[in-house]
Amino acid sequence: MKNIEETSMEPILEIRDISKAFGGLQAISHFDLQVGSRDLVGIIGPNGAGKTTLFNMITGFIPSDSGEILFKKENITYLKPYQVVGKGIARTFQLVDLFKEMTAIENVMISCFSHRAKKHKVRVGEKPWETAMGYLEEMGLGDRFNEKVKNMAFGELRLLDIARAMATQPDILLLDEPFSGLDNENVEVLSAAIRHMHNKGQAMVIIEHRLKDLLKLVERVVCICFGEKIGEGNPKDIMCDPQVCNAYLGGRSE
Amino acid sequence: MQQLNQYDKLFGLKSLYKRLAALAVFGVLVMLAPLVIKDLYYLEILFLCHYYVILACSWDILSGFTGNINFGHAFFLAGAGYLGAVLNINFGLQPWLTMPIGGIVAGAAGFIIGVLTLRLKGPYFASVTFCFGALLYKVFMVSSRTLGGEEGISGVQALTNSPLGNFYFSAIFMMIVIFVLYLIAKSSFGLILRSIGENEMASEGSGINTTYYKIVGFVISAAIAGMAGTMYAHVQMHVGPEMAHDSLSGLILMMAVVGGMGTIIGPVIGAFLLTLVNESLRFLGEMRLLIYSSAVIVVILFAPKGLFEIISQVLRRVGGQERAK
């Protein structure tokens, strides 16, 4: 198991002993996690392991039953989603959840109007669509700015969702299965974008099923099974962990 | 940067000024109407058009944009109308005072109902607003001693000295409401309301306090309806329980739906059209309701996004052909 000292810096996100049950189903059980301010962490686990539930709890979409979530040492366990964004945590969604009748730039502009984005405005006097355009260009969507979301390709929507999340100026970005539904070419584009953001100092946590692509990106991997953490370490070690191999990889390591 | 310039044209001030200029032309045409229409009966109908435009647009800024359907808009206009009547008759307050008071009180009522209901998702808001409207109607019906019961309250001071004065007052009020609401709709506030209507969860996930924006939208919506209700009380010199009837809330909703929800201009079209059609079919007696309702169903079936969408599409095609030439 990785200690605080081993993370790249002082942890900004600390999850302490959180649990969540839906009726008789224990979705998350006594889960702990620490993420440093420049970390790039991957979360893996079989379907139904509780990965998205974990993100939903961190971002305030689902309240936890017990335990606490600290962000920059402040308890954010029971904050509402917009308050969590205000603290500096943004997320994307597994099923891309955007404003379909709006254009790409309008989708990003909504985030530019959030309280946090206004407070952390990079350039004073910049029009909101100029700020939004910057994020779109960073994701390679500059020429698609005026396209309605409902007419955009799935790969573009994934990139747009990240641009929308980034426009809230987060300290940490949570990506929920960003490669899901993408072809290899788009995975490469998205991986490059993630690498670029991380090189600029962006902390990120990524839930992903495409192990090969994820392991090329992240520095640390956490494996969840039936709501419990069963392994944590660098990608190489975690792939050799027998418990992880049994639970997730069907007994073989890649 | 070239793309940004293009976006500036589409979204920025240039296009906004063009649309505001089009609204100004509409305003001038409205003001010039009495030069052609001299008959007092028709002026009265035009006053009703202005009144319904104000109500439909004020309904639209919350319900049309956020999808939180208000089934009790009459609650605010009737409540403020009665308040204006009582303040005028019992305390001698003039219309220039009762109208803003009616607006403030209706806005405050909108705030309280909004705080209680708008944080909830789903049909709660629609149900609660419907109940508030129905409750007020009953209160007016049974309060025969204080509020005149079924008869209502008569003898309210007239708004102006003539029907022409009422016409101009309502026309100016309507144009101010359209301008203000249109500017709100085109602002960041309007974009956020639209985002809530499309996907409230994603809006919250983008850092937007959706409850706050919905409550502010509701306060604006209720305050404008309250001022319109007080204006109506002074123009009719009478208030009655029918002002709070659910059928009026339904009519306002229908005007916005037929014209095009979430557009501000759509409800203007819907309110003018439905008022004029309703009045022009009056000679048919009870049959008019059948024809009127059928026409509304046909519009909703064939133009689910409202007539404004069809008009916009036609204008875009014509504009495209002109540019191609």
Image (cartoon, coloured by chain):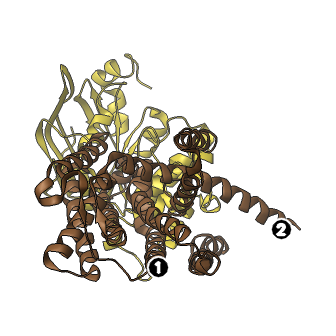
Chain colours: A yellow, B brown
Q: Is residue A167 above or below residue A177?
A: below
In whole angstroms, how far apart are the C-alphas of marks 2 and 1? 34 Å
Q: Nearer the viewer, residue B200 or A125?
A: B200
Q: Nearer the viewer, residue B50 or B2?
A: B50
Occupied quadrant, residue A242: top left
| Residue at x-position 54% and y-position 47% | A157
Q: Identify the residue under disc 2.
A: B322
On the same chain, marks 2 and 1? The answer is yes
Occupied quadrant, residue B295: top right
B311 sits to left or right of A11 = right
Residue type at the position of mark 1: Ile
| Residue at x-position 19% and y-position 40% | A63
Q: Secondary structure at mark 2?
A: helix
Residue type at the position of mark 2: Glu
Q: Secondary structure at mark 1?
A: helix
x and y percentages locating residue B166 in the rendered image: 43, 77
Query: What crowding class fits label 1: few (fewer than 14 Cα within 10 Å), some (14-19), or many (20 or more)?
Result: some
Can residue A89 be spotted in the picture?
A: no
Q: Is residue A37 above or below residue B141?
A: below
Q: Nearer the viewer, mark 2 or mark 1?
A: 1
For residue B172, the mark is 1
x and y percentages locating residue A108 in the rendered image: 47, 60
Quadrant where the N terminus of chain A lies? top left
Query: What crowding class fits label 2: few (fewer than 14 Cα within 10 Å), some (14-19), or many (20 or more)?
Result: few
x and y percentages locating residue B216 in the rendered image: 29, 64
Looking at the image, tell me whether mark 2 or mark 1 is earlier in sequence order. 1
